[in-house]
């Protein structure tokens, strides 16, 4: 497997003066449930730090009344049925499905809608469990899957994980397999980034990565380029944050605060 470096990523271009928030993508995040509302909040803030112009979190009506918006920049959309979900995703540039979600019939219906839509889609966390439950009968050309090793074992459930990864990439999916090193797979491509640190083994780190990748999709990156640059920035920000707060004390929110410096370093000669 190819070892990927800074030379393998496509950095964000310098912004032009005559632009506005709509030029940098509106992403929507389906996530959160009782006890797990922090997950989509982390993803949302990391998407903003990565450059998104607009970020929304979509919540079921029952969850909406319980959610405390941790970031005033993040919009919150509520829905009661699949028809309203369809309206929410209209004209959006990228979608993230999974952080903090619970497994239920409504979320199965939502995922089917998202898989049938044309909008670039990242499936993370419990979204992967829901995907396994509804089956792999959809084309995944617009989908990035971001399992950690534990989630991958449940999702793949085979003696040969590589064969299952090949099945997913044959369906068009891009797979970001998170571990001590992170492997990226696409049909006819595989590569590995090894810039992370043990300090990043903390709850919420994966939610941050999912938000970063979704932001890049919303800014018109291809699936593969979004996966590569997203993983690179996530790991670089982890290094920077670790230097600031120490190996044991790092939290996911520290990674978010380091994204800006990581972006600057990624364009330095």
Image (spheres, rainbow, N blue to C red):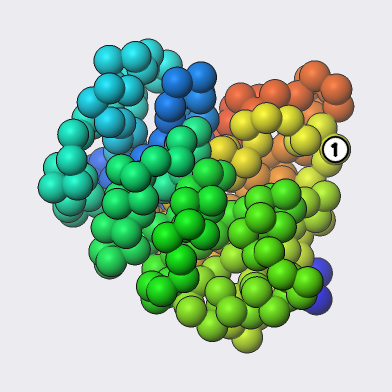
Q: Is residue 167 above or below residue 206?
A: below
Q: Is residue 212 above or below residue 73?
A: below
Mark 1 secondary-structure assignment: helix
Query: How would you rate the neighbour count of disc 1 (Cα within 10 Å): few for under 14, some for 14-19, many for 20 or more?
Result: few
Q: In which quadrant of the rendered image does the N terminus lie? A: bottom right
Q: Is residue 181 left or right of residue 261?
A: right
Please state which of residues 44 and 14 is positioned toward the viewer in this rendering: 44
Q: In which quadrant of the rendered image does the C terminus lie? A: bottom right
Q: Quadrant of residue 121?
A: bottom left
Label 1 belongs to which residue? 198
Name which residue lies at 78% across and 71% down. Answer: 159
Name which residue lies at 32% across and 59% down. Answer: 112
Name which residue lies at 33% across and 27% down. Answer: 74
Residue 3: percent from left, percent from top: 80, 69
Decide if residue 229 is in sight here: no
Decide if residue 203 is in sight here: yes
Name which residue lies at 71% across and 44% down. Answer: 236
Q: Is residue 178 left or right of residue 48?
A: right
């Amino acid at each position: 497997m190819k070892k990927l470096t800074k030379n393998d990523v496509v950095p964000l271009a310098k912004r032009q003066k005559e632009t506005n928030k709509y030029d940098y993508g509106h992403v929507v995040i389906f996530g959160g449930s009782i006890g797990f509302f922090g997950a989509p909040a982390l993803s949302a803030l990391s998407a903003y730090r990565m450059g998104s112009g607009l970020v929304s979190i979509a919540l079921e009506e029952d969850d909406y009344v319980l959610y405390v918006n941790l970031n005033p920049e993040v919009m919150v959309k509520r829905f009661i049925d699949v028809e309203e979900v369809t309206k929410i995703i209209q004209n959006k540039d990228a979608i993230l499905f999974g952080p903090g979600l619970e497994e239920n019939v409504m979320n199965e219906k939502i995922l089917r809608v998202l898989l049938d839509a044309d909008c670039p889609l990242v499936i993370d966390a419990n979204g992967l469990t829901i995907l396994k439950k509804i089956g792999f009968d959809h084309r995944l050309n617009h989908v990035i899957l971001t399992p950690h090793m534990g989630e991958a074992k449940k999702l793949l459930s085979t003696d040969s994980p590589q064969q299952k990864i090949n099945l997913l990439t044959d369906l068009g999916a891009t797979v970001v397999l998170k571990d001590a090193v992170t492997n990226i797979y696409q049909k006819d491509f595989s590569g590995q980034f090894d810039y992370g640190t043990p300090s990043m083994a903390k709850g919420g780190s994966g939610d941050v990565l999912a938000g970063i990748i979704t932001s890049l999709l919303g800014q018109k990156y291809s699936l593969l380029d979004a996966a590569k640059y997203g993983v690179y920035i996530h790991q670089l920000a982890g290094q920077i944050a670790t230097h600031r707060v120490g190996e044991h004390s790092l939290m996911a929110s520290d990674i978010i605060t380091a994204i800006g410096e990581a972006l600057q370093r990624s364009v330095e000669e």
